Amino acid sequence: MSYTSTFKIVIFGDSQTGKTTLTHRFLTNLFKEDITMTLGVDFHLKAIELDGELVKLQIWDFAGEERFRFLFPSYIRGANAAIFMYDITNYGSLAHVDDWFEIVEKEIDYKLPIVFVGGKTDLIHLKEISTRKAMDIAGSKGADGFIECSSRTGENIPKIFSLLTKLILRNRDSRET
């Protein structure tokens, strides 16, 4: 079976929210504790089969540190979907949500499917952001989905990328009709 499409997915959000461990878990199904900080952007490929289609996902893991934020506009361009990631144990990880979405809105002139992802559910005892509050923020930003996950346990990781791919395919199919 050959690939029917290649899609660009950008993962963004503040630093230390779990973007790189999410990516690593999705690619390898392993949890890696000692992840080094992303400098700029990391790029990965993974093929998945969904609804009889074999698609290639280009995953762009964007650094969350403020000093790299000026690079974000050039990396978000051309994306087919995105993940905004925050850490459920750190209320401050939502502090710059408006800044991130302002860049997306400025750079993207088409409907970009975005899924809000709350990471680190394995640390539920340290939770600072209620699911309801995060869902409200996601809704106010027009997010197309909301999922909480754990890269440590693997909880909901495949679901995130499956949802994104379905949203991309739905967008593609609606543009073709």
Image: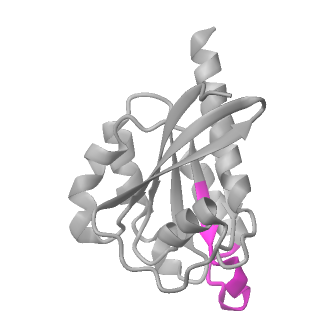
Residue found 62% across the figure and 61% down from its top: 26
Residue found 70% across the figure and 29% down from its top: 53
Q: In this view, does 90 lie above or below 167?
A: below
Q: Nearer the viewer, residue 129 or 77?
A: 77
Residue found 67% across the figure and 54% down from its top: 160
Residue found 57% across the figure and 15% down from its top: 175
Query: Can residue 144 be seen here?
Result: no
Looking at the rendered structure, the number of numbered marks drawn on it comes to: 0
Q: Is residue 26 above or below residue 169?
A: below
Residue 105 % position (x, y): 38, 41
Q: Which colour scheme appears in the figure?
A: one colour
For the N terminus, give its image quadrant: top right
Based on the picture, tell me whether residue 92 belongs to the magenta stretch.
no
Q: Which of 60 and 87 is in front in this view?
A: 60
Residue 109 % position (x, y): 38, 29
Given the current orientation, which residue lies at the most extreme bottom position? 125
Query: Can residue 58 be seen here?
Result: yes
Given the current orientation, which residue lies at the most extreme top position? 177
Q: For the magenta stretch, what is the residue range?
A: 116-130
Q: In this view, does 148 lie above or below 102?
A: below
Given the current orientation, which residue lies at the most extreme front position? 1
Left or right of 156? Residue 25 is left
For the C terminus, give its image quadrant: top right
Based on the picture, tell me whether residue 128 belongs to the magenta stretch.
yes
Q: Is residue 17 above or below residue 71?
A: below
Q: Residue 49 lies in what quarter of the image?
A: top right
